[in-house]
Image (tube, coloured by chain):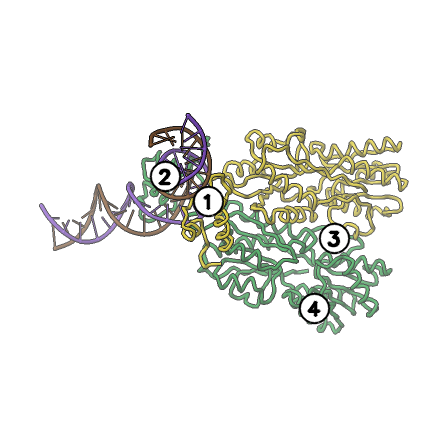
Chain colours: A yellow, B green, C purple, D brown
DNA sequence: TCCTATTTCTAAATCGATATAGCCTCTACT
DNA sequence: AGTAGAGGCTATATCGATTTAGAAATAGGA
């Protein structure tokens, strides 16, 4: 590699061609001769030419960046880091970079989205924490700005997304508990306005009905709650329904808090009560006493989200990529 | 906000000034009149003017990006996500963006660094997993490229860093175990070529000597190892030294594996053996049976790293920011 | 009054890439 | 032979910001 970064100009001088010709040759434009294209490509490769991002961006408006917009306090466990790593892995070798725009739960979720769109600081956004009628999705669709959601909206048919099948999770969770003889089940669920909460509840309710047992819902608890609050909620529920012998949890942190509560109340996990949780990270099985788990494939989610985002940018005319992680148990 | 993004040209037209004048006024250049500066700033504020990053970058070479270079598989727990969130929080309101460049442990750690420097895709890099004579640090220093390390090198005097005081951690870990009556301690340590491993060992060794008890070192185990491998190592150590009654762990994942091993060997945690771990994330205390913990302030690390990176970019002449997280117990 | 400084601003060039328009040079057809 | 059309390039302008050089206007000094 030469000491100075090669530009189109460098290649133009070496080849004796004009700068725009070199540009068009590298971009495989139809009005450039085959011989010229080969020559230019060869010189470019030898020099290790890489287009200057600022130049491309200034001229075309394309940033070659995909922004991952994350609520920071969400999901205390490693979920987020895994997702990031999977997305990044998928973007290796593409011309895209990843850019993370975290925002605080106290902030308006629209703020980072507006910023990205207005300053055009990315070609696409990937979002999590999706509401059924998410205003961010509405905003982006109106403006025809490429995006992918991790989770489904009401309008999911028409936009790219990847989702964990929470209906299946709810069903499997209850089924597993039933198979261990549990009959008085409670599902600790996030607020119902979150789409996945309703899905979990639907799945669990169906399975409980099929098994002829009861399933209560303890509403509004997520991993964003403080640990003490979750514990308090669980304790209160157990006081009211002491016959409870199975708990389905939406998030790992919630499950851990539930287990801690059970322990402090002298319940024996695996004996007179069971807890079931999503396992997005392998360490959960190390937890003692052990809870039951349903596997969530976060790595696949990350890969899919990245692919879907890239396709949304490059081929907006194609049908949106949509994927579902259906847990098997 | 007007429908079109305002540029310097927009302001120039409104004010009747030339574009460079507007630019210099906004940048507080000495050769612009005070009255003009006030006028220009006022118009800019009214329009909600924000400099176009591509324009600035193309012209000046400054990217306004700080790249966080992370080994992806490192630290299975939430550490990484917290760090990201803290860094991002600290950069809110500055002109800097954060950009994450993950790399896989199998890759050459130099690769992402070279890429960033050669393509000038960031103004500074923040790195973790620091070796005593880290080649990345050598490379960046040679080229005068701004960077901050999370962890110290041999040359730490002369560059910005933030570090967790692993010597103190090793000392406190052993002291806590000794206070609980443990006399046969093992420290599970990462490979000695990692700086922090040696520090942990030094701290622990000193404390053990002071307490007049033994401390062995079980070398080369990190959270990058597979869970089964860690468990195997611990089991082997316990077979060789059955009198072991205290374990100091370098990482959370290691501690959890150690606890699992002890359990499978019928040891009772808190009774005939204790495990002590760094607690970078609050959930560790929920783990049962409970281990002892030493708090690591990851949020502070992230804030500090961001500040140090920004200062390295903006004021390279100032002495580098250096910080230490000294755990207290 | 004339000339030199100083202050304050403008003109032009530049960073790297690409879009648009247009210019040659052949070929092909009437 | 004359001309239209295609193929293959080049010239020029442009994205938005900043740097450099220089110009106009004002002030100060002899």
Q: Which residue is mark 2?
A: B40
Marks 2 and 1, Cα distance to the nearest angstrom? Answer: 38 Å
Subunit under mark 3: B
Disc 1 with disc 4 on a shared chain: no
Q: Say above or below: B113 vs A228.
A: below
Q: Which residue is mark 1?
A: A23
What secondary structure is found at the residue carrying circle 1?
A: helix
Q: Mark 3: few, some, or many residues within 10 Å (few <14, many ≥20)?
A: some
Marks 1 and 4, Cα distance to the nearest angstrom? Answer: 61 Å
Marks 3 and 1, Cα distance to the nearest angstrom? Answer: 59 Å
What secondary structure is found at the residue carrying circle 3?
A: helix
Q: Residue at x 87, y 60 (%)?
A: B266
Q: Nearer the viewer, mark 2 or mark 3?
A: 2
Total marks placed:
4
What secondary structure is found at the residue carrying circle 4?
A: helix
Q: Mark 4: few, some, or many residues within 10 Å (few <14, many ≥20)?
A: many
- The foreground one among A202 and B53 is B53
Comes first in the chain, label 2 or label 3: 2
Q: Residue at x 82, y 70 (%)?
A: B240
Q: Which residue is mark 4?
A: B204
Comes first in the chain, label 2 or label 4: 2
What secondary structure is found at the residue carrying circle 2?
A: helix
Subunit under mark 4: B
Q: Which residue is mark 3?
A: B285
Is residue B246 among the parts visible in the rendering? yes
Residue B244: image quadrant is bottom right
Q: Nearer the viewer, mark 1 or mark 4?
A: 1
């Amino acid at each position: 590699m030469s000491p100075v970064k090669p530009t189109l100009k460098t290649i133009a001088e070496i080849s004796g061609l004009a700068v725009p010709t070199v540009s068009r040759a590298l971009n495989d434009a139809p009005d450039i001769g085959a011989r010229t294209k080969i020559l230019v490509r060869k010189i470019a490769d030898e020099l290790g030419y890489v287009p200057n991002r600022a130049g491309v961006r200034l001229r075309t408006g394309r940033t070659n960046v995909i922004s991952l917009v994350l609520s920071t306090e969400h999901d205390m466990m490693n979920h987020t880091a895994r997702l990031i790593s999977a997305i990044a892995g998928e973007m290796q070798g593409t011309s895209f970079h990843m850019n993370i725009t975290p925002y605080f739960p106290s902030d308006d979720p629209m703020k980072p989205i507006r910023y990205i769109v207005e300053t055009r600081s990315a070609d696409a956004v990937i979002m999590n924490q999706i509401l059924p009628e998410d205003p961010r999705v509405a905003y982006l669709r109106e403006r025809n700005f490429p995006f992918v959601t991790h989770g489904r909206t009401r309008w999911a048919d028409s936009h790219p997304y990847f989702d964990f099948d929470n209906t299946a999770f709810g069903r499997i969770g209850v089924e597993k508990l039933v198979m261990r003889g549990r009959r008085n089940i409670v599902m600790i669920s996030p607020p119902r306005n979150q789409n996945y909460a309703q899905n979990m509840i639907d799945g669990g309710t169906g399975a409980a009905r099929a098994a002829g047992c009861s399933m209560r819902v303890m509403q509004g608890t997520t991993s964003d709650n403080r640990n003490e609050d979750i514990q308090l909620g669980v304790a209160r529920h157990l006081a009211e329904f002491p016959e409870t012998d199975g708990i389905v949890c939406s998030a790992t942190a919630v499950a851990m808090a539930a287990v801690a509560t059970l322990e402090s109340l002298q319940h024996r996990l695996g004996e007179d009560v069971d807890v079931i949780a999503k396992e997005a990270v392998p360490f959960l099985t190390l937890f003692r006493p052990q809870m039951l788990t349903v596997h969530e494939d976060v790595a696949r989610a990350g890969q899919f989200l990245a692919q879907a985002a890239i396709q949304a940018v490059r081929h907006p005319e194609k049908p949106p990529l949509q994927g579902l992680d259906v847990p098997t148990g």
